[in-house]
Image (spheres, rainbow, N blue to C red):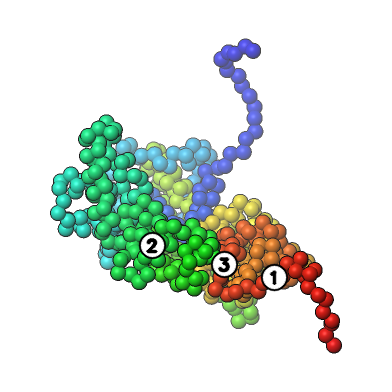
Amino acid sequence: MRMSFGQEMRMAQKQVLAPRMIQSMEILQLPMMALEERIEQEIQNNETLEVDEPGVEGAEAEGGAAVKLGDAPDPAPERTADERPLVVDQEHANQADFERSYDWSSEYPESDDDRSRPSAGRVEEASDRYLDAMANMEERPETLFHHLHEQLANYELSPGAREAAERIIYNLDTNGYLPMAPEDLVDPETPRDSEAWQAQVALLREALAVVQGMEPAGVGARDLRECLLLQIRPDMPHARQLRRLVADHLEDLAGNRLPLISKKTGFSIEEIEALRRELHSLQPKPGARFTVPYVPVVKPDVHVELQPDGTWKVRLEEVDLPNLRISPLYREMLASADTPAETREYIKRKINSAQWLIDAIEQRRSTLQRTAQAIVDHQTRFLTDGPEAIEPLKMQQIADRIGMHVTTVSRAVDDKWLQTPRGLVPLRRFFVGGTISADGDEVAWDTVRIKLQEIIQHEPKDAPYSDDDLVEELGKRGITVARRTVTKYRKALDIPSSRQRRDWKIAAPAKPSPAADAAAPAKDPPD
C-alpha cells in the first residue's frame, strides 16, 4: 500500500448547528438560579443590554425595546414618520457570532467619561445583595483535622511522636479511619528494616495509640472491627460479651446468623439480640459528624396550581428575572451616520448578541411552559392521589404531544423543579417506565416499588418472604415481574435479604419432613 501526502477537494453535506441555536439550547437547559446568573453576567459583559427598571420615564419613548419575561409581547405600535426601525444586518454574521468572546478593550479603550456607570439604584441594590449574602453566610463547620489537632496540643509528647501523630491525623479519611498501616507512613527515603526505619515505625505506633484515645471514640481505626472495639469501654454493661461478639462474630452478626453465634458462644438468642442493639448505639463512622453533607439549593422553575374547574395549570417562576431591553443610546449610535464604521460593526455585534439572548429566554419560557403543562396533564393522578398513583410516561410521548424533538424535551426538564401541593419535585421524576398488570393496564415501576415495600412491611417476621415469594405476592396483586427485577428493587431500596430480615426470637413452626409424614399413621377425617 502506497502512502503519500497530498491535497484534494471534496464536496460533502454536513449539518452544523448555528450559533443562535446553540445559545437557545444552552439557555433552555439552565435552571432558574443558573439563568439568573447568566443574565447578570450578560448584562455586565454587554453594554447594549440593560434592565428595563419600572418607573423609568421615557424608556419606551426613546425606542428601548423592553421585553418583559413571562408576558406575551404586545402588538407593535404604529411608527411615526420620524421613527426608524432598528435593522441589524444578518449577513456575514456567523463568523462574528463565534467571536463574542473577543477582547474589544484592547482595540477600543474606554475612558472614564465614556464608560457607562451604573445608576445609583443599581449600586444600592448590588450593595444590599452583598450585605445580605454576608449576613446569611453559614459559619464554617469544624473539621475532623482541627478537632483532633486541638486535642493533640494537650498531650505531652516528644517532638518525633508529635510529628508522627500529626502525620496520622493528616492521613485519616472522612470517616475517621486510617486506610493504611503505620509502616506505610514512614519516610520513603528511609531504608526499610534499618534502625531509622524501625524507630519511625515505633513512633508511628505510639502516635497511633494517642490518636485512637482521642474523641470521637473509634477514630484512627483501620477497619470496622477495630473501630467498634475502641468504642467499647470497660465500664460499659456487658463489655466482655460485646467485645467477644465484635472480635469473633462480626460477620455472623451482619449476616443475621444468630443460631450459629448462639451455638458457638452459649448465649441465648435474646441475649444476642440485646447485645446487637447495644452495638447499634455505637458509631461505625466516627468522623462522619464532621462531614457536612452537600445539599444543593434548588429553586422551582414551574408552579402547578389547582383551578376552580378542577384542572391543573402550570405557572413559570419568573419573579426574579429582570426585564431586558436594548439600550436606546446604542440604538441611536447604530442608526447615526456620524458613527465610525468600526464602531458601528462593534455595536451591531453586541446588539445581535443581546437580541439573541432575549429571544432565547423567551423561547425557553414557551418551551418549558408547554412541556410542563403536558407533563402535568398526563400525571394528574400523581397530584391528586400521591406518588403511588404515578403513571408510566416516556419523553417521546411528551415530545409527540407538544410537537417537539425528544432532545428538546430532555433539555427542558433537565435540572428543573416543579412546585406542587405535595412538595418540590424534579420534572424528570415524572418520567418512569412500567409493566403490564394482569388486567392489561400499565403500572409504573414506582408503584411496583411501593407495593414491594408494603409486602415486606407486613410479611411474617419469623419466616420472611424470599425473592421468589415476593414475585408470587406481587402476582396476587396483579403485578407480573421477574425475580431479578424484585432483587434489583429490593437492593435499591436497601432492604436486606430474607435471611437477614428474619427475627430469630420468634420460633418458626416446625415443618414435618416427608419421611415423618409417611411414617405417621393415617388419621380419620373429622366429622
What x and y, as percent, mark residue 348? 44, 44
Kind of element beneath mark 3: helix
Residue 491 vs 313, above or below: the answer is above
Kind of element beneath mark 1: loop
Kind of element beneath mark 2: helix
Residue in the picture at 78% in, 73% down: 520
Q: Any mark on residue 395, and which?
A: none
**Mark 1 burial class by Cα count in 10 Å: few <14, some 14-19, many 20+:** few
**Which quadrant is the N terminus positioned in?**
top right
Q: Which residue is mark 1?
A: 511
Sequence-wise, the earlier of marks 1 and 2 is: 2
Residue in the picture at 37% in, 60% down: 228
Residue at the far bottom: name it: 527
Residue in the picture at 38% in, 49% down: 46
**Which quadrant is the C terminus positioned in?**
bottom right
Q: Which residue is mark 2?
A: 243
Q: Is residue 256 left or right of residue 153?
A: right
Residue 287 vs 512, above or below: the answer is above
Task: Estimate the spatial distance between the alpha carbons at disc 3 and disc 2, rounded to whole Å.
Answer: 24 Å
Q: Is residue 377 left or right of residue 324?
A: right
Q: Are marks 3 and 2 in contact (CB under 8 Å)?
A: no
Residue 527 vs 383, above or below: the answer is below
In the rendered structure, which amino acid carries the disc numbered 2? Answer: Arg
**Mark 2 burial class by Cα count in 10 Å: few <14, some 14-19, many 20+:** many
Q: Given this view, does label 3 or label 2 mark the residue nearer the observer?
A: 2
371 and 434: which is toward the camera: 434
Q: Any mark on residue 501, and which?
A: 3
**Mark 3 burial class by Cα count in 10 Å: few <14, some 14-19, many 20+:** some
Sequence-wise, the earlier of marks 3 and 2 is: 2
Q: Tell me which corner region of the image, top left, top right, bottom left or bottom right, holds residue 452.
A: bottom right
Residue in the picture at 45% in, 51% down: 354
